[in-house]
Image (cartoon, rainbow, N blue to C red):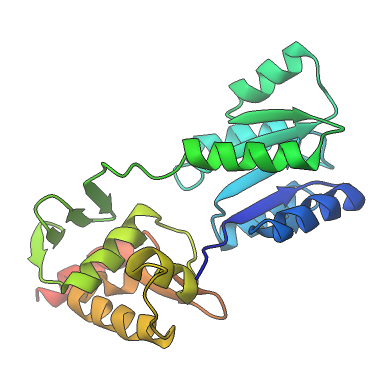
Amino acid sequence: MRNMPAVLVVEDEPAIAELIAVNLRHNGFRPTWAMDSASAQRELDAAVPDLILLDWMLPGESGLSLAKRWRSESRTKDIPLIMLTARGDEMDRVAGLDAGADDYMAKPFSTKELLARVRAVLRRRGPDPSKELYSVAGLSLDAATHRVSFYGEPLKLGPTEFKLLQYLLGHAERVHSRAQLLDKVWGDHVYIEERTVDVHVKRLREALGAAGTMVETVRGAGYRLTAKPLAAAVAHEKSGD
């Protein structure tokens, strides 16, 4: 069972966007196309991708401006980003990298090179396997001590629910299909029906109590852990009444 990284392609030229998307699909990626800054923001609001391919010259807000804004926001600041542009001189490359791009490709470019750079950026910006502490909106997990707490109060989770929560906390706000969760949490060498994920998500929500609302079902897509500090805090206070 193979995990397919999601790539948001922000490009206003349909022919170029289609060429990129076809090559991404044929090489194990899941592309989504946005033709301008407004549609790109809508896609990001709906789901956080694994990587963004961003054209500099867009209708309305420029790709450079988008990169700067996304790098300044906590939800999007860590998304790997490659800038695509016809502007290829040194000053433009420096401007793109200073805006927060992880890499920069001048048009026209080879699709093989683009795919190689996508893979390289994902390797560089992949999750830190040594990370042991996770915390989102009062919900904390310590992998070293195998402890979970919500606003300081300990929670008891089973081993599978613990692994599931660890993965969701490490990729907060991103939507994960059942197949992706099976791949990352159970491992692709284990055959388990996808509906098994639903059972463990239900158990995880029950074990989290008031924080269980942070694990959202995204209809037709899968699950995500989202930061809802206000709602979670209110529920937490009510549970203590």
Q: Residue furthest front?
A: 189
The residue lying at 64 percent from left, 53 percent from top is 7
| Numbered disc total | 0
> 21 or 133, which is in the foreground?
21
Q: Is residue 146 left or right of residue 200?
A: left
**Residue 40 in sight here:** yes
Q: Position of residue 43 (x, y in %)?
A: 65, 58
The residue lying at 53 percent from left, 35 percent from top is 71
The residue lying at 80 percent from left, 15 percent from top is 89
> 123 or 151, which is in the foreground?
123
Q: Is residue 161 left or right of residue 225?
A: left
Q: Position of residue 134 (x, y in %)?
A: 25, 50
Q: Image quadrant for the C terminus? A: bottom left
Is the residue 109 above or below the residue 164 in the image?
above
> 169 or 196, which is in the foreground?
196
**Residue 80 in sight here:** no
Question: Quarter of the image holding residue 70?
Answer: top right
> 77 or 2, which is in the foreground?
2
Q: Position of residue 63 (x, y in %)?
A: 73, 36
Q: Residue furthest top?
A: 90
The residue lying at 16 percent from left, 69 percent from top is 237
Q: Position of residue 99 (x, y in %)?
A: 61, 26
